[in-house]
């Protein structure tokens, strides 16, 4: 067991290392391909003419004259140990680990920007996840109990239709109906759950529904096929034969076994989602990680893009590891 | 659509040996075709898919018959079609008229039907190409990993694992942004979108895993052993003995990956990093419509429905195919 966890953690670190290298190299491509000074991607302009001494000095201060691997080394050192950041005029700022650098475009530490955006994305993911888990499993179970019935057909065709609806269509449609036509919501802005729980729900209810719709469909289909398989097992017949009522058999014996693989997928989906709510946040104008990434990509704010990508990778890899470890607890055969 | 090619028939018959003989020597694909024909929803999906392919292929012919082109713009100053103050199309439902059947777009005044027709071409071209890329990579690498095992399997599987834990959406957006700094070439952009959709999950790593799993069990089968004992080379066995057995899963995977890629392309174009104007794309239309949907909801609904109908059609067909090809399903 301990060996298994250790191996998984080493594997996860290796993956993160690969991601960090690929991200770093990818973003060096921009300056290299466009023959612009990398200074541009840090401060948003090239203040001195090409080839001038001032520009060279500026590049030297940011370390762009160093070989690529040394720049990568500095970047990673900053993340692991923290660093002092200076613009050469005002007093240097200490940026403690994990330090993703400083966004000269937004005049803030990348870490601060990430910390401000993360709660929005996390709220979005958690609420949606709860909705789709409950909704999907319920629909799937009902479908599986009477396979081939009208309810089953409607549930399954409905879920196929739901996965075919992109958020950038359902989102504006819901805004149109619930905000502008019916006037139930009045363009709510995101507030922290600790300040105003009702406002929090109001600001997130539409994005939750849109996101949950998409995933609930997949979970319904998965639950249905797992349930169908489990309900055909011998121990279910035994449970029925000994006279347990249908409800107990379905919930305690059937659902428990059918849900195990779903837990795995659930964990990974949440991990993936935290870095991929870009479209939802764009549609509903939420200032989360997705918005931060698309905003910094369009202004070519390199340090922020790198920070968001790495945070998304960490969320994804961590959720994979947690799921693997949980799974090995549920099913000890895995870790052998 | 004829699924009963002689080669496939012979090859797939091997897999289910006994069963096939019992039902008058019908091949697995022939059985699947019979089951599929009985599945009304899947057939409806299939018909829509064929229609879509025809629309995409003959978009220019259809446009000539229809008589309006998305390249003709109307501006609010000189045209009677747009409101001079708001630049919104005049008339009901976004300016629906006998010349512009589905109305015109706000501000630029492009014909919506023409945009939709060519949007279908963009969408299918990218989705199908990306699926082909995923298939070629996935089948080749999955076959190699499953058949040879050992360190080859180790390297390929690990590489796919790493890809599966990449924040792919952010990577794709960044890659496409870096590209637009470098070049404004349309062809290059198409290629990169296809690469991003086919290479990143859910693209080749998924099909690679599926194929690998199938091959792992197939290579231990008696007919492979028989072939080997007759002196067949590894390449021969992979091509002639194992690959034909993968036709079923690959067919299902293909029909289910195309809709994912349609959504993927639309999403990237919605975010502004996909296909660039003037090339029409459904995602781009939705992104544009998002600015005006309170005043002109028709413009939002039309491209949305186009995406929904095409994706649903492929999904219905793929779902039906999976049921039809599954030997366990009793229908």
Image: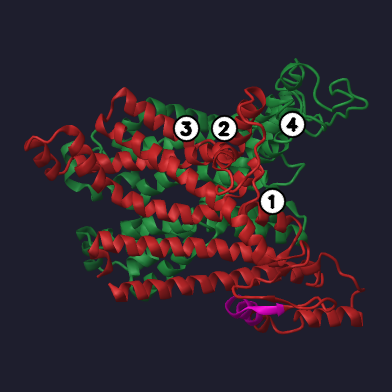
Chain colours: A red, B green
Question: What whole-number distance in Å separates the C-alpha atoms at marks 1 and 4?
Answer: 20 Å
- Residue lying farthest to the front in this orientation: A195
**Secondary structure state at the residue bearing disc 3:** helix
Q: Is residue B292 magenta?
A: no
Residue that badge 1 annotates:
B273
Residue that badge 4 annotates:
B292
Q: Where does residue B157 sit, x and y in percent of width and height? A: 41, 67
**Secondary structure state at the residue bearing disc 2:** helix
The answer to whether tags 4 and 3 share a subunit is no
**Nearest to the observer: residue B40 or residue B176:** B176
Q: Chain of mark 3?
A: A
Question: What whole-number distance in Å separates the C-alpha atoms at marks 3 and 1?
Answer: 27 Å
Q: Where does residue A97 sit, x and y in percent of width and height? A: 60, 75
For the N terminus of chain A, which image quadrant?
bottom left
Of tags 1 and 2, the one toward the viewer is: 1
Residue that badge 2 annotates:
B52
**Nearest to the observer: residue A92 or residue B245:** A92
Stretch of the chain drawn in magenta: A73-84
* Circle count: 4
Residue that badge 3 annotates:
A161
For label 4, count other residues whose C-alpha is less than 10 Å away and answer few (under 14), some (14-19) or many (20+): some
The answer to whether tags 1 and 2 share a subunit is yes
Q: Chain of mark 2?
A: B
Q: Residue at x 67, y 35 (%)?
A: A187
């Amino acid at each position: 067991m301990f060996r298994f966890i250790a191996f998984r953690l080493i594997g996860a670190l290796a993956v993160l290392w690969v991601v960090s290298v690929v991200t770093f190299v990818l973003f060096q491509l921009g300056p290299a391909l466009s023959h612009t000074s990398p200074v541009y991607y840090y401060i948003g302009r090239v203040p001195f003419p090409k080839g001038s001494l001032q520009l060279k000095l500026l590049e030297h201060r940011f370390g762009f004259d160093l070989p690529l691997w040394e720049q990568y080394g500095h970047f990673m050192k900053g993340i692991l140990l923290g660093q002092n950041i200076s613009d050469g005029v005002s007093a240097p700022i200490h940026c403690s680990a994990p330090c993703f650098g400083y966004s000269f475009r937004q005049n803030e530490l990348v870490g601060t920007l990430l910390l401000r955006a993360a709660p929005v994305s996390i709220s979005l993911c958690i609420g949606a996840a709860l909705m789709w888990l409950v909704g999907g499993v319920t629909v799937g179970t009902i479908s599986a109990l009477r396979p081939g019935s009208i309810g089953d057909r409607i549930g399954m065709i409905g879920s196929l239709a739901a996965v075919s609806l992109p958020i950038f269509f359902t989102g504006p449609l819901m805004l149109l109906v619930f905000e502008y036509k019916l006037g139930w919501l009045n363009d709510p802005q995101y507030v922290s759950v600790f300040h105003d729980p009702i406002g929090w729900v109001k600001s997130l209810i539409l994005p939750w529904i849109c996101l949950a719709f998409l995933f609930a469909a997949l979970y319904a289909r998965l639950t249905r096929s797992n349930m169908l398989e489990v309900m055909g097992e011998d121990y279910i017949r035994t449970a029925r034969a000994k006279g347990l009522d249908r409800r107990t058999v379905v919930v305690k014996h059937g659902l428990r076994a059918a849900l195990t693989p779903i837990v795995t997928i659930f964990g990974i989906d949440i991990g993936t989602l935290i870095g991929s709510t870009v479209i939802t946040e764009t549609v509903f104008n939420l200032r989360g990680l997705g918005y931060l990434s698309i905003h910094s990509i369009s202004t070519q704010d390199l340090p922020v893009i790198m920070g968001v990508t790495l945070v998304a990778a960490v969320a994804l890899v961590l959720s994979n590891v947690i799921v693997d470890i949980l799974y090995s607890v549920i099913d000890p055969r895995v870790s052998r | 659509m004829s699924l009963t090619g002689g080669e496939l028939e012979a090859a797939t018959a091997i897999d289910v040996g006994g069963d096939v003989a019992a039902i008058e020597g019908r091949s697995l694909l022939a059985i699947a075709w019979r089951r599929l024909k009985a599945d009304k929803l899947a057939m409806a999906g299939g018909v829509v898919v064929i229609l879509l392919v025809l629309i995409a292929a003959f978009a220019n012919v259809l446009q000539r018959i229809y008589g309006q082109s998305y390249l003709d713009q109307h501006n609010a100053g000189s045209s009677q079609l747009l409101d001079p103050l708001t630049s919104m199309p005049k008339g009901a439902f976004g300016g629906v008229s006998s010349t512009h059947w589905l109305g015109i777009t706000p501000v630029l005044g492009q014909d919506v039907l023409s945009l939709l027709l060519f949007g279908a071409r963009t969408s299918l071209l990218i989705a199908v190409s990306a699926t082909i890329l995923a298939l070629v990579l996935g089948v080749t690498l999955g076959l190699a990993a499953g058949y040879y095992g050992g360190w080859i399997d180790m390297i390929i599987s690990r590489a796919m694992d790493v890809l599966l834990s990449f924040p792919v959406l952010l990577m794709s957006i960044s890659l496409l942004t870096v590209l637009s700094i470098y070049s404004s070439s349309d062809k290059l952009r198409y290629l990169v979108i296809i690469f991003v959709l086919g290479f990143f999950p859910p693209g080749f790593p998924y099909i690679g895993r599926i194929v690998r799993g199938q091959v792992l069990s197939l290579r231990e089968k008696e007919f492979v052993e028989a072939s080997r004992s007759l002196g067949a080379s590894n390449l021969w066995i992979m091509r002639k003995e194992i690959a034909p057995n993968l036709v079923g899963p690959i067919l299902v995977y293909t029909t289910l990956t195309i809709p994912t890629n349609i959504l993927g392309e639309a999403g990237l174009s919605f975010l502004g990093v996909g296909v660039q104007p003037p090339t029409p794309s459904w995602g781009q239309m939705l992104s544009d419509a998002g600015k005006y949907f309170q005043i002109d909801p028709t413009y939002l609904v039309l491209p949305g429905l186009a995406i929904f109908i095409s994706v649903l059609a492929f999904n219905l067909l793929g779902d039906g195919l999976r049921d039809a090809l599954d030997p366990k399903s009793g229908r």
